[in-house]
Image: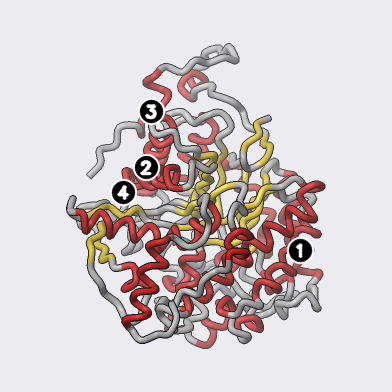
Amino acid sequence: MVTSALGTYNVRLYGPPAMLTRQGLPYSGKYFLKDSEKNFTFPVGFLFGTASSSYQIEGAWNEDGKGVNIWDELVHKHPEYVVDRSSGDVACDSYHRYRQDAQLLKNLGVHFYRFSISWSRILPTGHVNVVNQAGIQYYNNLINELLANGIKPLVTIYHWDLPQPLQDLGGWANPVMADYFEDYAYLLFSNFGDRVKAWITFNEPDSFTGGYGTSGYAPTFHAPGIGEYLATRTVLLSHARVYHLYQAYFQKLQRGKLGITLNIHWCEPLTNSTEDIKACERYQQFKLGLFAHPIFSYEGDYPEIVKLRVGQKSKEEGFRNSRLPPFSLKEIDYIKGTWDFFGLNHYTTVYGTSGEEGPIPSISRDAGVITSQDPAWYSTGSPWLKVVPWGFRKQLKWIAQEYNNPPVLITESGYSDLPNEGLNDVGRVYYYTSYMTEMLKAIYEDGCNVIGFCAWSFLDNFEWNSGYTEKFGLYSVDFSDPSRPRVPKKSAHVYSEIIRSRQIPMRYRFWREK
Ligand code: NOJ
């Protein structure tokens, strides 16, 4: 048994190293790591998982009383927003195939499975006046099936699929959403909290609040430089409400942990000029600090540089007040410290240089950073995603220094197949082994408190505006076959080997970086 910031898990301690068992040598039960092995061996209690989200895998979009959410609405009314004009109507059909999924997760050997709950499957109107028992039943079945297979559920409460009736009231731009989010979370804790011991309030607020600015994400509400900040404010208050709710009414009995998942690319200064170094610092503060500083810093509130720049720009642009609405002192205090762990989604790195681009007003101008990537970096099937392992280590170090080394759970990291990569996805194997090697350096050499790693994604799935054209799964899914067969890729086997041996396999330790 191992107790970490994510709860108590049944994890085998060090080794035995795969090499020894494979040769059939006796294992004494004690293993002292040589220095050369140490940096490739995961620390005691380190946890492994894999992740998905409701809209991306469940399908059954209108079955058994589920209501309509903002992604249902977007893909049906505006198919042109998705490159292949596809939808999550059926996706991986996990709503009907959760038993098989649990079996595959067991085969992988993961300690936990991160999935999200579809708000409108449980509350079709978004409000607690109508509870859909079939929805409650589905998640009860899934949770029970996971536990029966020795896998702990890690539940994301909100992974982008807001009930459409709540969007009709303004969605996250409307502060009243905090009340509805609290009601929804209360229902989840009451129904599932006896078995779910780890919760994430929000997945990637930086991404989904973009849907109120310029991005093509639902609800595609275009109020750049204004909408994102309104939504950000509500999301932070909603997160804090739910953290306090859990502490006040559930923690004593259920003893779970609660955090939030934030996303960030590492931003490497394009040159060593002070301007570029400062620009990359602004990138971190506008994309990560906007959410992390109010929750994880000692002082709380938005980062100073963000308040300063948005205030100045707003004035120049003729606004009466800052487009970033301030928190009261009471609110700052209320949000500060509302975490048990820091969930991090990290995929890639960009170069940053000082400069302004984008509409006036916009977050991107407020931040004043222009980003690019090195064409020599290994590519993936996603234009934005280059394989840059060293950026991961730098990012982890930045978080440890900025927020006093909180326990960080990597809630996502992953790679999308190159065209025709098929089941022999060596690119993904390189991605995971090299990123994990850098993560181990962050742990052992920089002292970062990283407690677990979660591969995105369990299955190939609906990749938002990219539809089914970008495949992130450890398992491939044939979307042309009604039974949605799942087949493990090479990376699934390697990930499984890593989990079981608790080491980076010898043959993947010496990749050469570009
Ligand atoms: C972040 C999101 O949380 C997830 O939904 C998405 O599929 C992956 N990144 C890959 O883009």
Residue 243: give x, y in percent of width and height: 67, 57
Q: Which mark is residue 186?
A: 1
**Which sits earlier in the primary sequence, circle 4 or circle 3?**
4
Q: Which mark is residue 506?
A: 3
Q: Decide if residue 180 is in sight here.
A: yes
- For residue 403, side relative to residue 280 (left or right): right
Colour scheme: secondary structure
Element on which disc 1 rests: helix
**Which sits earlier in the primary sequence, circle 2 or circle 4?**
4
Element on which disc 4 rests: loop
Marks 4 and 3, how far apart at CA: 21 Å
Q: Which residue is mark 2?
A: 393
Q: Are marks 4 and 1 in contact (CB under 8 Å)?
A: no
- The residue under label 4 is which amino acid type? Val
- The residue under label 3 is which amino acid type? Met
Establish if 320 lies above or below 179.
below
Marks 2 and 4, how far apart at CA: 10 Å
- For residue 499, side relative to residue 7 (left or right): left
Residue 9: give x, y in percent of width and height: 67, 36
Circle 2 crowding by C-alpha within 10 Å: few under 14, some 14–19, many from 20: many
* On-image quarter of the C terminus: top left
**Which sits earlier in the primary sequence, circle 3 or circle 2?**
2
**Which sits earlier in the primary sequence, circle 1 or circle 3?**
1
* On-image quarter of the N terminus: top right
